[in-house]
């Protein structure tokens, strides 16, 4: 009946007075039948109206509605602290206009809790328990307990004590890239001010501990009762304590009076104020020097200067040294980086060192400099053009009297180069380079400015562009063209800037056109022929004259006088060569045992080379009054591209190359179960015969080989046998050993070289036990763990992952040759021999997880001398580090002890003691 009356009323079927009466009766019945629902509706409306009149969804305590979850679920909600009007029309209007009240927050707050969320509508609070998280704009907060004050727009977060009284779930806040942990946090959403109790926050490389912290805005915070440290422990090993401080985010920390404390034990080291930079980007600043005292230099300050953080592409540093005994040094370094273009570094140093007392004859002065430039172009910078630079120029004594790396100190050969290359559609290639070489031991200098190389890629003149089908033999004929030009100076460092040195610069041009004709004979033979035309042009030549006489004391003398002559001189040279090669394979298989197969590859090579005499007037003579003979010499001895031969050559050579490999079982290879091992990489037997020579046509028989049967062992050898005899005057004559001594050949010399590079660590024995043989772990170039960089500062890169490493480098060379004196005096030994035998050893061992010891040394077995030796001890002190370097032998003997903070922000907080290596000179 209720439904019927409701539908009749809804459809407006009551239209007359009778109907009006029935309508009233209907309304009465509706109120009567719907009286329980009407009462509930009024209650709901009252509650909803009261809820809308609040400033935000409230939390509850004892008389509130609350939601709980078990450990498998979480509760999530979103609030915005908006104050809604109570009038329904205003609500509709507000919803239509989509506007918030002036007191509402601009952003929503999202929160979640793993245990429970309690909403108190009366006190306008929300409580979150266990692993609560809240997100507001760029702020993320985690804590065991949170309380939102909806009326006050404040947030409170803290940890919760367990049954034993231990507090867990301390608040952790994140904003941007910063994160800090505290005991309590109070945050006002409108003023955006934060008050934190007992906070630990990370700023740059350091950590700030504060008893009370107040954030006044996004950039500035104030701390009361705090400390600064680079130790990441809750109770740090050391700290700089202060009473008040101001923190400017991504800028600096400024404190009042501060003092250094170790493990909460104050030290007498105090400062009236302190400033700690916490920039995440580079910034300019003063570099604090190190100081000390030495016997030679007196009191000194080292590496005092200023760093300029110019921009993201450049930075610059200036450093200086000064001593009380007059020595000083100036150093600068610049790094530059252009993304997708290039990277590089430029270093310049000048040092003036004094030895001896002022005003005494023993006073010595050394002026030294060093220039280093390294430039690398990014491959993406240009598709066809490349430019690179490596320049390293030093004076003779720079690495001797100034701090330098171990490699620089032990080296005496330095090279520099600038190179530029480009090409046009991969057809025409252009290369230009500048070279500089320097030997600090014999003071030789070589300069090439520039070396130019122009070439055309290999092309096939008889091959059609759209050739289809099988190629004919003439289709493989190829040609190429190359032109080279160079200007070179070879002199001593003291004569480099003399005018005569530059007047006698050597200039040469060489053109080369090779023609190659490869022909396949059958299926196994390769017949290659080559014709090469070489044109050499020079702008100078060297003439010689002979002078003999008596000096002022009456003693006789003789001298060859070189004469440098300018002009244009052209030489022509042509060579024709042809060779016939093939490969012969022999395979021996075994069914039993670990050895499964032996493969022997024989590669015979028969070749003939013809080179006519086109020297023309390229040779001169002078009369030697002592020997009474005409001596022939080349005008172009020592020329850039050499001269041409003065004798016709027609040499036939026969060589046999051998390669031997074995195949053994291997558990490591799970597919084939086999492994290849090379026994001999190559064994070569060769000999030649010169048809154009007037005598001594047979060339010595040579046997050479190379093997690396073990990855750590490299062995090369060469044996030489001569078919001709040596007469009583010690000269090789045109008489064969077969006719005179009834033997085919005479042993004339040999070379044997053995190199062992052996690196042993814990992985070495693991693999050896598994495989039953030595691991193939070829060691890199041995480097000491502790060494100095270019400015003399210790390298801090250490590796504790490998508990121990041992590297052994052993070199053995045995050289023999004919002793000419034996044939002149039979009492002498028949062969001259020379043995070179050295061993280098380096090892680093982790004594404990925090202690490491490193040893680098070497020994010359023949001369019985130790090479450069260094012992280093390192201790990892968590946020500190301690190291001791000791060089017991040689010119650089001395020691260096240092304990310092690891972080770069406090790199000047250190204690250093040393014995300067320059004191050995005194």
Image (tube, rainbow, N blue to C red):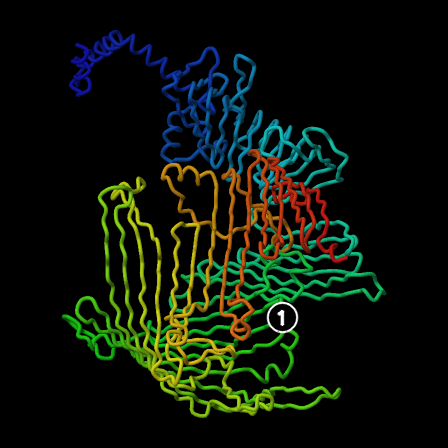
- For the point 46% across and 60% down, which residue is it? 752
Where residue 703 sits: x, y (%)?
Answer: 38, 65
Q: Characterize the local packing of mark 1: few (<14), some (14-19) or many (20 or more) Cα atoms within 10 angstroms.
A: some
x, y percent for residue 762: 47, 38
Q: Quadrant of residue 464?
A: bottom left
- Seen at 72% across and 52% down, the residue is 916
User: Does residue 465 appear in this view?
Assistant: yes
Measured as percent of width and height from the top left, residue 784 is found at 57, 49
Q: Position of residue 242 (x, y in %)?
A: 70, 34
Q: Residue at x 35, y 60 (%)?
A: 682
Secondary structure found at label 1: loop
Q: Quadrant of the C terminus?
A: bottom right
- Residue 451 drawn above or below residue 169: below
- Disc 1 marks which residue? 443
Quadrant position of residue 350? bottom right
Q: Is residue 352 above or below residue 289?
A: below
Seen from the viewer's position, the closer of residues 577 and 255 is 577
Between 72 and 461, the one nearer to me in the picture: 461
Q: Residue furthest right?
A: 359
Viewer-nearest residue: 406 or 347:
406
In this view, the residue farthest toward the left is 469
Quarter of the image where the N terminus is located: top left
Specify whether 248 is left or right of 613. right
Q: Residue at x 33, y 72 (%)?
A: 425
**Residue 195 appears in the picture as rendered:** no
């Amino acid at each position: 009946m209720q439904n019927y009356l409701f539908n009749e009323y809804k459809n407006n079927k009551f239209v007359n007075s009778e109907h009006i009466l029935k309508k009233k009766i209907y309304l009465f019945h509706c109120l009567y039948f719907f009286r329980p629902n009407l009462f509930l509706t009024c209650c709901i409306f009252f509650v909803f109206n009261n809820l809308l009149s609040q400033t935000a969804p409230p939390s509850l305590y004892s008389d509130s509605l609350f939601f709980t979850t078990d450990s498998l679920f979480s509760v999530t909600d979103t609030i915005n602290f908006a104050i809604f009007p109570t009038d329904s029309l205003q609500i509709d209007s507000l919803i239509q206009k989509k506007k918030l009240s002036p007191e509402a927050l601009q952003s929503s707050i999202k929160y979640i809790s793993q245990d429970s969320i309690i909403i108190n509508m009366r006190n306008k609070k929300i409580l979150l328990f266990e692993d609560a998280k809240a997100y507001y704009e760029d702020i993320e907060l985690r804590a065991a307990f949170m309380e939102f004050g909806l009326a006050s727009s404040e947030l409170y977060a803290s940890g919760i004590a367990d049954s034993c009284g231990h507090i867990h779930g301390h608040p952790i806040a994140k904003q941007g890239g910063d994160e800090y942990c505290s005991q309590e946090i109070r945050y006002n959403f409108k003023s955006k001010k934060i008050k934190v109790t007992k906070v630990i926050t990370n700023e740059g490389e350091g950590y700030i501990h504060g008893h009370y912290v107040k954030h006044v805005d996004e950039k500035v915070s104030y701390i009361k009762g705090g400390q600064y440290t680079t130790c990441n422990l809750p109770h740090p090993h050391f700290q700089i304590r202060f009473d008040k401080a101001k923190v400017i985010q991504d800028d600096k920390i400024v404190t009042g009076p501060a003092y250094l404390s170790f493990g909460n034990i104050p030290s007498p080291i105090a400062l009236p104020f302190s400033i700690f930079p916490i920039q995440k980007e580079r910034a300019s600043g003063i570099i604090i020097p190190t100081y000390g005292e030495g016997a030679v230099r007196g009191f000194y300050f080292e590496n005092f200067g200023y760093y300029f953080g110019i921009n993201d592409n450049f930075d610059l540093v200036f450093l200086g040294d000064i001593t009380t005994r007059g020595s000083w040094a100036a150093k600068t370094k610049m790094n530059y980086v252009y993304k997708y273009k290039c990277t590089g570094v430029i270093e310049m140093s000048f040092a003036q060192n004094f030895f001896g007392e002022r005003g005494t004859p023993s006073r010595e002065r050394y002026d030294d400099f060093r220039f280093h430039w390294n430039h690398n172009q990014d491959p993406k910078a240009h598709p066809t053009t490349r430019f690179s630079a490596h320049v390293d120029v030093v004076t003779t004594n720079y690495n001797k009297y100034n701090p330098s790396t171990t490699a620089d100190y032990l080296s005496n050969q330095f090279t520099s180069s600038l190179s530029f290359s480009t090409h046009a559609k991969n057809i025409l290639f252009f290369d230009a380079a500048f070279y500089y070489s320097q030997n600090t031991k014999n003071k030789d200098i070589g300069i090439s400015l520039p070396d130019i190389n122009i070439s055309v890629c290999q092309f096939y003149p008889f091959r059609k562009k759209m050739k289809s089908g099988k190629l004919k033999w003439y289709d493989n004929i190829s040609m190429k063209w190359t032109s080279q030009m160079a200007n070179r100076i070879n002199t001593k460092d003291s004569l480099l800037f003399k005018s005569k040195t530059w007047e006698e610069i050597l200039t040469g041009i060489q053109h080369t056109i090779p023609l190659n004709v490869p022909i396949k004979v059958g299926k196994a033979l390769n017949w290659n022929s080559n014709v090469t035309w070489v044109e050499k042009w020079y702008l100078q030549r060297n003439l010689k004259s002979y002078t003999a006489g008596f000096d002022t004391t009456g003693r006789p003398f003789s001298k060859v006088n070189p004469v440098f002559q300018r002009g244009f001189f052209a030489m022509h040279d042509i060579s024709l060569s042809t060779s016939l090669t093939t490969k012969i394979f022999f395979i021996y298989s075994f069914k039993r045992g670990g050895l499964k197969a032996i493969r022997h590859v024989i590669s015979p090579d028969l070749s003939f080379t013809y080179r006519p005499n086109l020297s023309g007037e390229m040779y001169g003579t002078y009369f030697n009054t002592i020997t009474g003979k005409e001596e022939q010499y080349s005008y172009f001895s020592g020329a850039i591209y050499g001269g041409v031969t003065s004798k016709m050559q027609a040499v036939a050579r026969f060589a046999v190359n051998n390669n031997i490999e074995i195949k053994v079982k291997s558990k490591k290879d799970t597919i084939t179960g086999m492994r290849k091992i090379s026994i001999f990489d190559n064994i070569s037997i060769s000999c030649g015969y010169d048809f154009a020579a007037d005598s001594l046509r047979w060339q010595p028989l040579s046997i050479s080989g190379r093997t690396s049967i073990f990855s750590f062992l490299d062995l090369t050898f060469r044996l030489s046998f001569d078919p001709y005899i040596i007469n009583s005057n010690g000269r090789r004559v045109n008489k064969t050993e077969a006719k005179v001594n009834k033997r085919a050949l005479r042993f004339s010399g040999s070379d044997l070289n053995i190199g062992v590079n052996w690196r042993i660590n814990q992985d070495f024995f693991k693999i050896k036990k598994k495989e039953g043989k030595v691991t193939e772990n070829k060691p890199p170039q041995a480097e000491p763990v502790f060494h100095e960089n270019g400015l003399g500062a210790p390298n801090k890169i250490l590796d504790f992952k490998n508990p121990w490493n041992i590297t052994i480098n052993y070199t053995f060379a045995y050289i023999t040759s004919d002793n000419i004196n034996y044939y002149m005096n039979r009492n002498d030994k028949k062969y001259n021999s020379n043995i070179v035998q050295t061993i280098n050893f380096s090892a680093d061992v982790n004594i404990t997880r925090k202690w490491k010891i490193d040893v680098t040394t070497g020994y010359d077995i023949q001369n019985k001398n130790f090479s450069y030796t260094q012992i280093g001890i390192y201790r990892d002190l968590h946020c500190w580090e301690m190291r001791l370097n000791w060089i017991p032998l040689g010119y650089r003997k001395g020691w260096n002890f240092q304990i310092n903070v690891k972080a770069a922000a406090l790199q000047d907080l250190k204690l250093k003691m040393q014995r300067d290596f320059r004191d050995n000179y005194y």
